[in-house]
């Protein structure tokens, strides 16, 4: 099992460009999450999907959109990238949304917006 | 506001030595506390998970302790190895009805193990 995979690993965008970060999990998990990690700060939740067909905002959703394509895949889209979105993005999944279920993280996407 | 504070921010130790990392939290009500290890350029990987009723939990050379009364946890690493060099992140979950969307992450302790 590959666990949680993310593409691309690295990306450089110019301000105003758009892109989609892809995430897939092969653990048959119901819930999926997108986080960003910035220096000196803990991981912050951008969006999450409790189950296939549902998505909800997290702590820092502005400037992002998500799609839960199917049970396996959860994508994050930046419509008009800004330098403030320079960050490392992590996708995670868990069997269920309850906090007692462990979250498994992907390897991350390092995004730079110039 | 729920907060998780970790100390020290960074730590350098010699291979073979022990070390202890600290985590203080204000999350209430409290469900469980996790310690994650994050290698450079990788995603976090879970080391231990403790519920509010557990005082200690081990995973090989890693031992986590929890004092729910004082809202403090520690991660003790025994006989450190070069491969222990990583960031260690404390994560606290809200009460039993809380979701995985409510986790509070600490900023991590950056550990470097040297020869």
Image (cartoon, coloured by chain):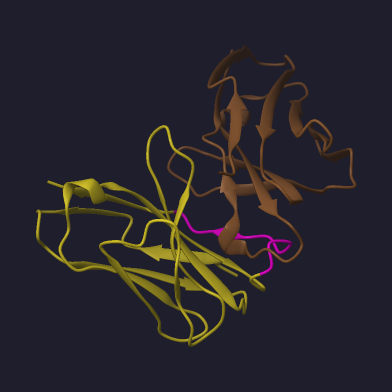
Residue B89 horizontal/vertical position (percent): 59, 38
Chain coloured brown in the rendered structure: B
The question of residue A105 being in magenta is answered with yes
Q: Kindly tell me whether residue A105 is visible in this rendering.
A: yes
Image vertical order of residue A24 relative to residue B40, above or below = below
Asked if residue B114 shows in the view, the reply is no
Q: Image point 60% across, 53% down: which residue?
A: B103
Residue B52 falls left or right of residue B102: right
- Report the residue that reaches farthest toward the front: B1
Relative side of A82 to B75, left or right? left
x and y, in percent, of residue B112 in the image:
55, 21
Q: Which residues are magenta?
A: A98-107
**Chain A painted colour:** yellow
Tell me which residue sits at (90%, 47%) in the image: B53
Q: Nearer the viewer, residue A19 or B6?
A: B6
Image quadrant in which the N terminus of chain B is located: top right
Q: Quadrant of residue A2?
A: bottom right
Q: Nearer the viewer, residue B82 or B4?
A: B4
Q: Residue B12: where, in percent of width, then height?
A: 57, 14
Residue A61 versus residue B45 in the image, above or below: below
Q: Quadrant of residue B64?
A: top right
> What secondary structure is the stretch in magenta mostly built from?
loop
């Amino acid at each position: 099992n590959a666990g949680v995979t993310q593409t691309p690993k690295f990306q450089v965008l110019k301000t105003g460009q758009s892109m989609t970060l892809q995430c897939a999990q092969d653990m048959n998990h119901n819930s999926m999450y997108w986080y960003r990690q910035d220096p000196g700060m803990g991981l912050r939740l951008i969006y999450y999907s409790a189950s296939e067909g549902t998505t909800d905002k997290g702590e820092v959703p502005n400037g992002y959109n998500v799609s839960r394509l199917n049970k396996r895949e959860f994508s994050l889209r930046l419509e008009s990238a800004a330098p403030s979105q320079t960050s490392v993005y992590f996708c995670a999944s868990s069997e269920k949304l309850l906090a007692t279920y462990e979250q498994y993280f992907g390897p991350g996407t390092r995004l730079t917006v110039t | 506001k729920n907060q998780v504070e970790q100390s020290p921010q960074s730590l350098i130790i010699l291979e073979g030595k022990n070390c202890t990392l600290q985590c203080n939290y204000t999350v209430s009500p409290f469900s469980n506390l996790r310690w994650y290890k994050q290698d450079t350029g990788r995603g976090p990987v879970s080391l231990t998970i403790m519920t509010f009723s557990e005082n200690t939990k081990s995973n090989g050379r890693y031992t986590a302790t929890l004092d729910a009364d004082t809202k403090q946890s520690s991660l003790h690493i025994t006989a450190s190895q070069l491969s222990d060099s990583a960031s260690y992140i404390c994560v606290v979950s809200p009460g039993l009805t809380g979701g995985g969307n409510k986790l509070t992450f600490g900023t991590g302790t950056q550990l470097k193990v040297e020869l």
